[in-house]
Every structure is written in C-alpha cells, then in structure tokens.
C-alpha cells in the first residue's frame, strides 16, 4: 500500500523534475557522447529542443525544479524510511546470491535460459535495479544540492573536484556535480525504459496489482484463486 | 505481490477430481474475477481522477497571475526557499579557492548597463543611505582600502563556470569605512546583523542593470569590489572601472560597472529576480 503511494507520487514528480531539468540544461547544453572532436551523440540535437519547446525557459525551469525538489526528496526519504522500518528492505536489498540470480534473469529474459526462474517477490535483477535507482536518487539529491547551494554546501562538491583533479581532469567540484546530475538523469530515463518494457512483459495482472494493490494468485492447493493483498 | 512474478506464471495442471469439485473451483474463480474487476474499476477510476487533477493543477498553476516573471505559486515556493536559505546562511563558509594554474579565460557574458558613451575618468561611486557625510567615493579611495585577492569560480546561472583571479577591496571593508546607519543608533558593528539595514543595492550608472544583496552576503569576506581581473586592470566589457565579484552567488549578481551603492531595509530591485529568477541566486 505505502510502496504504491511512494511509487505513484514519484512517477509524475520525477517526470516533472526531468522536464524542468531540461529547461535548465538547455542554457548550457555541453554534454555529449564521444571522444576528442568526434561526437556520437549530442545532448541534445536542436530538433529535440524545438519539438518539445525547451528553449529560453531557464527561469521557468528553475522555479519548477526548486519547488518540486521538496516533494521528490521527501517522498524518497519517506520510501527509504518505510522500507527500512517495515522490514520490506529484506525483499529489496541485494544479498549474496543476487548477482548470480540477476545474471540468470538476464539470460532468461534474453531467451537463453529456458527453465523458469525460481519464484520470489523480487528476483535478483529487480533487487539490483530497485536498489540502484534509490542510490541514484540519493546521488541526484546530493549533486543537486551541490549545484543549488555551491558555497554553503561546498563540502558536497569539493571532494568531487579533488577526485577529478587526481584523475587528470580539469574540472571543479561544481562542474563534476553538474555532470553527474545530468548523467544520473539519463540513468533514470534508461531505468524507465527497461522498467516499462519489463512491466509490459510481466503482463496485466502484475500491472493491475501495482494500481489496485491486489493480484490474482492461483494457489497450488486447494487449486483455486484468491485475492492477495499487496503489502 | 505475494508470490508470483507475473511473467513466470506457470499453468498448474488441474488434478483429476470429481466434476463437482471442478465446478466449485470455477465458481470461486469467477467470484475472484468479479471482485478483482470491482477493485480494478475503483482503482483505475481513482487513477483517472488523479491524472485529471494533476493535469488541471498544472494548467491552473501556469495560468496564475505572474509575479516577477513566474506564476505566483512558484514565486511563493522560491520565497520559502529563500527564507530558509537566509536563516541557514553562514558567513564563515567560504567559496573554494584554486591554484593560479586553474584560471580559465572568462567570456564577457552580458552588457546590460554597459553603454558605450561612458567616461571612466569622470567615474565616482555614489553612496545612498550612508550614515556619514560621504556621498561619493573615487577609485583611488577604494584602492586605498586593504587589497584583497582570490581565485574563485564564477558560476553562471546558465550552467557554465570559470575560475578567475579577482583583485579589489572587500565590500565588508568598504561598508565598515562608509557604514550605513544602525537601527539602534549605536556604532556600526558588522557582527550585529539585526542592527543593520537588511540589504545593499547596486546599480550601473545608467540604472539599466541592478542587483540586490542581503547584508550578510555583502559582508561575506569573499565579496569584493574589483578593479582588476586575472592580474590586469579590469577591461570595459568586464565592468571597468569597478565591478562586484560575489562568489557565494551566481554570476548574475556580480554586477559590472557599479555606479551607485544603496543601503536599505527595503529589498532593492533586482534585474533578473524581476524576470523569473530567485532573488538569492546562489549561496
């Protein structure tokens, strides 16, 4: 029940954070995938900005971003507290066998492994994905704060600068924080794409369960269906 | 979910049983399906209401009266953030400084208030709202204040940043030398913020560009009135003869070619804060 609330509050808020983040990013859109003078992918092509009317809206983007950041952060902290206190974390945190299991899930999903996977509330790949995305959320929150209040919270950004410097990059902590903040966002989009694809594969009963909180479960004994409440 | 992982659902073979037992299973299944349909209908209706409310909420918000460039509910949110940040502001936290090898070329980004017909030789800084007799100071008088130098990062609100060496007088030294009146009438004390005017306003000589600073940000030890940049006299496009360098705030607050400095308890007008940005723009 609580998990569904956290999830469905987060979905539109994260979407709006990414959208307002794009309005901000547009003002200095320097990131790309490539090396030297070769660019494979520029973030973002002009057509992308035009298609979604992103240009010249920096102030508007910042206003939305700095209003919704509260909901994003409070909802995220609430989720972590809830899973920690309720014991739900046992189903979500990766364990010793998670990596091996996740590998089997990937093989299964790629149709390489033929046998069905062992039943569990969350399989290894899900444990990894759902835990990583929370760590990413924390990363977005911290790097966001490092850009938002770069002097008062310089202790957040400065270590990043020292790491970059020792790795031979001429970047300040503030610049690294902005870079990370951007790539974490791309990470969320990637997560979203895989997540939606997997939800579609999992089928209607599963998706309906995330909406209603109930899933039809066919029991082995006494071989009839029951409605099982979601935690 | 209690046990099944959707995509891995395996059809269990129905054991060979009597027809009536099978019939009761079918009935139970039908009942479950009926309950589920009811639950789904309820949940999806609520979902539809939530989506509608969200869409309507955004439309409502975007159509609110604009207050300084953004709908007023968003302006309230920014003001709440500002009030919180102002309470948490600590003057002793310094902007990171860098080695001289890290200095970047600085682009001249913004020329509002930098009209060409300007005679730097006639320039003086006008002071408004000071407690003493002084109403204007010359560049020589500012250079007579203790010289401060720092290599800090100028962060543009657009998202880029550059490391710059700034040379000038601390605004805090300037304020101590030409202090504002105190509320109590006692002598100026930089530590007693409550007794000082809340703000310092700065504007270009033609008044085209203007910024407002909280007194505590003005008194930050790294807030400089600069007359030199990267070891050379300030160039016109960078705000000669005197500009502000305030690393605790984004670059929009580092006003070029300062003409007037005003002490005030009324929050001064701020060029970009009137155009949708938050008043603090940094910290």
Image (cartoon, coloured by chain):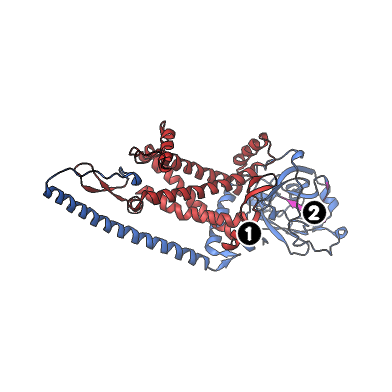
Chain colours: A red, B blue
In the rendered image, the vertical position of residue A42 relative to residue B122, given as above or below? above
* 10 Å crowding of disc 1: few (<14), some (14-19), many (20+): few
Q: Residue at x 44, y 36 (%)?
A: A103
Residue A206: percent from left, percent from top = 34, 50
Mark 1, chain letter?
Answer: A
Query: Magenta span covers which residues?
Result: B232-245
In the image: residue A15, left or right of residue B68: left
Disc assigned to residue A46: 1
Query: From the viewer's perspective, is the residue at label 2 or at label 1 nearer?
Result: 1
Q: Could you tell me if residue B80 is visible in this image? A: no
Q: CA distance from mark 2 to mark 1?
A: 38 Å
Q: How many marks do you count on the picture?
A: 2
The quarter of the displayed image where residue A108 is located = top left
Pointer 2 residue: B242
The part of the image, by quadrant, that contains residue B270 is bottom right
Residue A193 visible somewhere in the drawing: yes
Residue at disc 2, secondary structure: loop
Name the spot of residue B122 as percent of width and height, x first.
Answer: 87, 60
Q: Quadrant of the N terminus of chain B?
A: top left
Residue A168 in the image: state x and y as whole percent.
68, 36
């Amino acid at each position: 029940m609580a998990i569904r609330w956290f999830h469905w509050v987060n979905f539109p808020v994260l979407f709006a954070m990414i959208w307002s983040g794009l309005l901000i990013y547009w003002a200095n859109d320097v990131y790309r995938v490539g090396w030297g003078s070769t660019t494979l992918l520029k973030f973002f092509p002009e057509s992308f900005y035009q298609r979604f009317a992103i240009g010249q809206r920096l102030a508007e983007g910042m206003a939305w971003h700095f209003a919704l950041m509260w909901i994003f952060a409070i909802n995220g902290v609430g989720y972590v507290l809830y899973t920690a206190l309720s014991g739900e974390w046992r189903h979500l945190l990766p364990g010793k066998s998670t990596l091996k299991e996740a590998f089997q899930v990937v093989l299964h999903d790629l149709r390489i492994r033929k046998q069905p996977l062992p039943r569990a509330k969350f399989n290894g790949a899900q444990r990894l994905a759902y835990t990583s995305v929370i760590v990413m959320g924390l990363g977005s929150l911290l790097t966001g704060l490092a850009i938002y209040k770069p002097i008062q919270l310089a202790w957040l950004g400065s270590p990043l600068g020292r790491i970059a410097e020792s790795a031979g990059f001429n970047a300040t902590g503030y610049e690294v924080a902005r870079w990370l903040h951007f790539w974490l966002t791309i990470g969320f989009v990637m997560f979203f794409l895989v997540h939606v694809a997997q939800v579609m594969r999992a089928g209607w009963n599963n998706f309906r369960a995330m909406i209603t909180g109930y899933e039809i479960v066919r029991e082995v004994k006494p071989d009839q269906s029951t409605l099982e409440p979601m935690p | 979910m209690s046990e099944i992982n959707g995509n891995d659902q395996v059809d269990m073979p129905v054991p060979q049983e009597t027809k009536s037992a099978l019939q009761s299973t079918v009935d139970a299944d039908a009942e479950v399906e009926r309950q589920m349909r009811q639950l789904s209908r309820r949940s999806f209706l609520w979902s539809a209401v939530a989506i509608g409310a969200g869409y309507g909420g955004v439309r409502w918000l975007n159509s609110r009266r604009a207050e300084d460039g953004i709908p007023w509910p968003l302006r309230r949110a920014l003001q709440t953030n500002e009030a919180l940040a102002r309470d948490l502001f600590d003057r002793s936290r310094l902007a990171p400084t860098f080695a001289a090898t890290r200095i970047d070329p600085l682009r001249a980004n913004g020329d509002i208030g930098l009209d060409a017909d300007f005679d730097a030789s006639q320039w003086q800084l006008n002071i408004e709202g000071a407690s003493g007799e002084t109403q204007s100071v010359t560049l020589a008088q500012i250079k007579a204040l203790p010289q401060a130098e720092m290599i800090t990062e100028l962060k543009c609100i657009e998202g880029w940043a550059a490391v710059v060496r700034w040379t000038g007088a601390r605004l805090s030294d300037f304020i101590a030398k030409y202090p504002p009146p105190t509320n109590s009438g006692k002598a100026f004390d930089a530590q007693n913020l409550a007794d000082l005017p809340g703000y310092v306003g700065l504007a270009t000589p033609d008044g085209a560009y203007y910024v407002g600073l909280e007194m505590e940000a003005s008194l930050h030890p790294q807030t400089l009135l600069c007359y030199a940049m990267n070891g050379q006299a300030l160039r016109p496009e960078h705000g000669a003869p005197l500009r502000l360098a305030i690393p605790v705030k984004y670059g929009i607050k580092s006003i070029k070619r300062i003409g007037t400095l005003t002490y005030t308890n009324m929050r001064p007008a701020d060029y970009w804060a009137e155009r949708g940005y938050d008043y603090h723009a940094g910290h």
